[in-house]
Image (cartoon, rainbow, N blue to C red):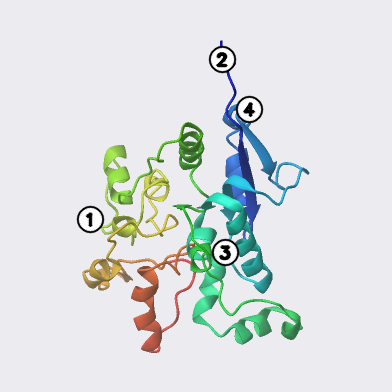
Amino acid sequence: MTAHVAAPRLRVGVAKLASCDGCQLTLLGLEDELLAITERVDNVEFPEASSRRSKGPYDLLLVEGSVSTPEQVDEIRRLRKDAKMLVTIGACAQTGGVQALRNWLAFADVAGAVYPRPDEVASLEQAVPISEHVKVDLELPGCPVSADQLREVLAAVLVGRRPQLPNEAVCLECKRRGIPCLLVSATEPCLGPVTRAGCGALCPSVGRGCFGCFGPHVDANPLSLASGGRPRDHGSRELPLLPTPLFTAWAEPWRDAAEPRSHAGEAAPHAGH
């Protein structure tokens, strides 16, 4: 009789670059589900949760944060070499995050306005997504990342199938939840038609327009949306159709939509509507 040989446990790591740690906290927030997952994998690197450290190799590596310093360029290249599958989690890793809002300005001007000794600040001219430096196998959007999507990726990797992730617009989530369209009612500017679903239409559900924290979905055309959104007169105020993306402003095609305004001498994109 042939003895049963158990399959080797997957080596899983979690790392961070320039970020707030919110996506890692979302992973920790899985709680009981996470405990069940860790019974089937070896969690060899997760500084947010354990003092156990490992430089790899990893079967699956989740990475949070944008690449903002020369040291992080070296770090992500090393991690890529040590990971069979590299998954970026969250808007910072996928699009550069809030840090990338400075990319429309000269870094020397930004550093000089913030730091008393800007010449001592070791930073790249631009904060960019991980995919601009290494090959990424899968990107999970969001600020923070969706717990449901994290769960789906971990489960899929464990059973050896492809993760099933949404790539539809937030508008469809609004329709399924019975949320009135803020654009049609002309009460709020909204990026829902060009933003990837995954948040459950959180902001529209409380009467606030989507500002794109899950990034653009495939074939998103913000220029087309904006072309029909010249300011409308609503009594004493004008309502622009599009807010400025906040967490994902550096993502294409939103970056391309914003740059003509900057070239024309208008203000560069900033946080908020």
Residue under the image location 23 percent in, 72 percent down:
227
Q: Residues within 10 Å of mark 2 (few under 14, many from 20)?
A: few
Q: Quadrant of the C terminus?
A: bottom left
Q: Residues within 10 Å of mark 1 (few under 14, many from 20)?
A: few
Tell which circle, 4 or 3, labels the residue nearer the N-terminal end.
Answer: 4
As drawn, the label of residue 184 is 1
Q: Residue furthest top?
A: 1
As drawn, the label of residue 2 is 2
Q: Position of residue 100 (x, y in %)?
A: 53, 70
Above or below: residue 122 compared with residue 191: below
Q: Amino acid at mark 3?
A: Ser
Tell which circle, 2 or 4, labels the residue nearer the N-terminal end.
Answer: 2
Measure how far apart labels 1 and 4 are at the Cα level. 49 Å
Tell which circle, 1 or 3, labels the residue nearer the N-terminal end.
Answer: 3
Q: Secondary structure at mark 2?
A: loop
Q: Amino acid at mark 2?
A: Thr
Is label 1 or label 3 in front?
A: 3
Q: Position of residue 91 (x, y in %)?
A: 50, 58
Q: Amino acid at mark 4?
A: Glu
As drawn, the label of residue 39 is 4
Q: Amino acid at mark 1?
A: Val
Q: Position of residue 225 (x, y in %)?
A: 25, 66
Q: Quadrant of the N terminus?
A: top right
Q: Position of residue 202 (x, y in %)?
A: 42, 46
Name the residue that disc number 3 marks: 66
Is label 2 or label 4 in front?
A: 2
Quarter-of-image position of residue 190:
bottom left
Above or below: residue 251 compared with residue 22: below
Tell which circle, 2 or 1, labels the residue nearer the N-terminal end.
Answer: 2
Residue 18 appears in the figure: no
As drawn, the label of residue 70 is none
Q: Residues within 10 Å of mark 4 (few under 14, many from 20)?
A: few
